[in-house]
Amino acid sequence: MNSKVKANIKAFFDPETWTYTYVVSGGKGTPCVIIDSVLNYDPKSGRTSTHSADEVIQFIQNEELKLAWILETHAHADHLTAAPYLQEKLGGKLVIGNHITNVQSVFKGVFNLEAGFAVDGSQFDHLLTDGESLDFGELSLKALYVPGHTPACMAYEIGDALFVGDTLFMPDVGTARCDFPGGNAKTLYQSIQKILSYPNETKLYMCHDYPPNGRSPEFCSTVGAEKSGNIHVHDGISEEQFVQMRTQRDETLQMPTLILPSIQVNIRAGHFPEPEDNGKSYLKIPLNIL
């Protein structure tokens, strides 16, 4: 793995969505990246707020960091991204994997979005391809294409760490669901094997944790811990066994609480739909579709 200097990793937990946001830098006064930010959203009122993002901004300002890239591991279905707000306050460029175009195409149809909604990823500043690298100061990140949960998931390798998005969870939680449009359990199994082919000591940073049995939320595992103890995909679990388990389990799961607002906003790189003639922005609720 490429590591010019040691990466400093700061995790921020949003308890409303069980989401971890990361700031990665080379230390005080250096360029940094943000991975998987959160815009707070109240589904009862339709109101957004920025307290989670403001905590990230305060840290970056206190550490005198310079924001280079604002990264998404995928178009999240369980929280809204705060990327445009962070960009407005701190600069940086919005980045996601290049297969976001597939997701945009699917959900433009699901939500019957306006004819002018582009499905070419142009809402983002940069679309990463598998294996592509981005530099920030003396650090660099490498994109690893890991579809399955969605057709556009990316993990990001920085030094001896992988930021895995929703592909894997802590060992006692398991793996991502695959029943969203474009998801595929067989593909997810193959993507997980890519991750688990890294050295056992490789650190894996989660986008979420849903802790069972009353334990406190955690955000970091290792390849070795996942191979030995992941309840869904530990060593010895075949692709066929995994696909059967994942398919049966997904049939029992409810949709995430924030899937309808999250997808509509996140495929726009976090921007809201254009205001209507009254100056207000609106999201759609498709009936009897999802």
Image (cartoon, rainbow, N blue to C red):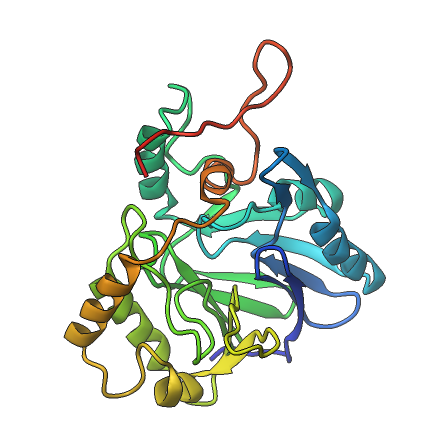
Taking the image as shown, residue 92 lies to the left or right of residue 78, namely right
In which quadrant of the rendered view does residue 140 lie?
Answer: bottom right
Give me the residue at 69% from left, 55% from top: 67
Q: Is residue 146 left or right of residue 60?
A: left
Measuring 34% from the left and 60% from the top, which residue is drawn there? 177
Q: Is residue 290 left or right of residue 12?
A: left
78 w.r.t. 230: above or below: above
Question: For residue 108, which quarter of the picture?
Answer: top left
Residue 199 appearing in the image: no
- Vertical comparison of 158 with 279: above or below: below
Q: Is 230 situated above or below 68?
A: below
At 20% from the left edge and 65% from the top edge, which residue is drawn? 186
Q: How many marks?
A: 0
Q: Which is nearer the eye, 128 or 53?
A: 53
Q: Nearer the viewer, residue 258 or 76?
A: 258
Using residue 181 as the reference point, say whether residue 265 is left or right of it.
right
Q: Position of residue 277 (x, y in %)?
A: 59, 9
Which residue reaches farthest right? Answer: 62
| Relative image position of residue 107 (x, y in whole percent) | 35, 35
The x, y position of residue 183, in whole percent, is: 28, 53
Residue occupying the far left of the picture: 240
Q: Position of residue 290 (x, y in %)?
A: 32, 39
Task: Report whether residue 196 is seen.
Answer: yes
Q: Residue furthest top?
A: 277
Q: Quadrant of residue 149?
A: bottom left
Residue at (65, 64) in percent of width and height: 13
